[in-house]
């Protein structure tokens, strides 16, 4: 819908008989473009195999280009087989570049309902129509504090899994220059506030901060993504006392070299300032 008008304009986008999943839109104000991304599935076994991208002119809504980019398996994680390693990706962020390209960041996420049938459902914690205690509407670009469910009976408990962080750079021609992953495995029951990650943009590189050891939440792992797509492990961010439980996914960058990350200390809420 365009500003000042009460009618909708329909834009037909050709997806070439493919099936797409998780479509999301990013507005590039600097280059006056709308960028639409979606994961696409192969026709044989319906596994996620790549990224579909459409670029629209923000004024005329004319299509400036489309592309289907298959993901590389060079950074394969042995936890999964080759055909299913991208199936659980949830888009988390799109970082725009002045050139018109962008960096896509997604996370391998799913949940498990601990009911009698032990059903698996990646959408359970984000489903606003689910009556089992979910408090928040699904928005992949923002993280939310999630208190415990109202009940802890077997029929309503949930287990959350946050695994690999996936990133890919797409250039102005909508081609993938590289894709890479940070391999991690996280899970918890009923509460996912200590899972997932915080993203810190340092200009020439991006930090990804997360709690790797659920038994010791006072240690924060730090992985650095360079402009060339390389991932470097940097020293742990640690607190000598083990009673601190950091919640990186709720962190907020407040400056060029600073981020605030909340933590729990004997059930008291506090905030840690981390500077580089």
Image (tube, rainbow, N blue to C red):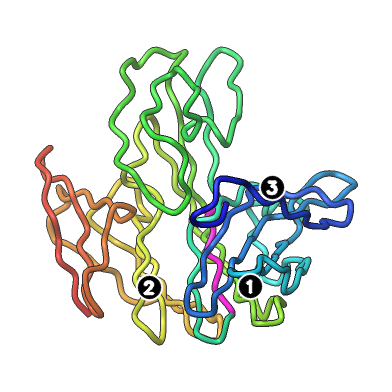
Q: What is the crowding at mark 3: few (fewer than 14 residues within 10 Å), some, or many (at least 20)?
A: some
Whichever of callouts 2 and 1 sits on the residue coming sooner in the sequence is 1
In this rendering, which labeled residue sits more in front, label 2 or label 3? 3
| Residue in the image at 57% along x and 36% along y | 122
Q: What is the crowding at mark 2: few (fewer than 14 residues within 10 Å), some, or many (at least 20)?
A: many
| Residue in the image at 82% along x and 56% along y | 15
- Spatial CA distance of label 3 from label 1 is 19 Å
The kind of secondary structure element at disc 3 is strand
**Magenta-tinted stretch:** 101-108
Q: Is residue 170 above or below residue 130?
A: below
Q: Which mark is residue 202?
A: none
Residue underneath mark 2 = 207
Circles 3, 1 touching at the beta carbon (< 8 Å): no
Quadrant position of residue 46: top right
Q: Nearer the viewer, residue 267 or 133?
A: 133
Quadrant position of residue 38: bottom right
The kind of secondary structure element at disc 2 is strand
Whichever of callouts 3 and 1 sits on the residue coming sooner in the sequence is 3
Q: Position of residue 67 (x, y in %)?
A: 77, 69
Relative side of 53 to 137, left or right: right
| Residue in the image at 35% along x and 61% along y | 198
- Spatial CA distance of label 2 from label 3 is 28 Å
Whichever of callouts 2 and 3 sits on the residue coming sooner in the sequence is 3
Residue underneath mark 3 = 21
Asked if residue 48 lies in the magenta stretch, the reply is: no
Q: Nearer the viewer, residue 2 or 157?
A: 2
Quadrant position of residue 53: bottom right
Q: Is residue 48 above or below residue 61?
A: above
Q: Which mark is residue 179?
A: 1
């Amino acid at each position: 819908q365009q500003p000042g008008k009460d009618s909708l304009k329909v834009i037909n986008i050709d997806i070439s008989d493919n099936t797409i999943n998780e479509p999301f839109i990013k507005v590039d104000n600097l280059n006056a473009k709308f960028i639409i991304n979606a994961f696409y599935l192969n026709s044989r076994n319906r596994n996620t195999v790549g990224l579909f991208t459409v670029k629209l002119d923000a004024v005329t809504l004319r299509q400036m280009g489309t592309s289907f980019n298959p993901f590389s398996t060079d950074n394969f994680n042995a936890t999964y087989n080759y055909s299913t390693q991208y199936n659980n990706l949830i888009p988390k962020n799109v970082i725009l570049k002045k050139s018109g390209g962008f960096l896509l960041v997604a996370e391998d996420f799913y949940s498990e309902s601990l009911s009698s049938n032990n059903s698996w459902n990646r959408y359970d914690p984000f489903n606003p129509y689910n009556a089992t205690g979910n408090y928040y509407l699904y928005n992949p670009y923002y993280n939310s504090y999630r208190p415990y469910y109202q009940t802890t009976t077997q029929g309503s408990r949930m287990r959350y899994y946050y695994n690999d962080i996936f990133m890919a750079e797409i250039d102005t021609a909508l081609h993938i220059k590289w894709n890479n992953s940070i391999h991690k495995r996280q899970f918890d029951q009923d509460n996912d506030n200590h899972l997932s990650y915080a993203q810190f943009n340092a200009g020439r590189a991006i930090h990804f901060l997360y709690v790797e050891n659920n038994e010791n939440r006072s240690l924060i792992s730090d992985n650095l993504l360079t402009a060339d797509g390389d991932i470097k492990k940097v020293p742990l961010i640690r607190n000598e006392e083990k009673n601190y439980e950091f919640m990186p996914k709720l962190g907020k960058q407040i400056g060029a070299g600073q981020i605030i990350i909340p933590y729990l200390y004997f059930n008291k809420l506090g905030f840690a300032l981390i500077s580089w």
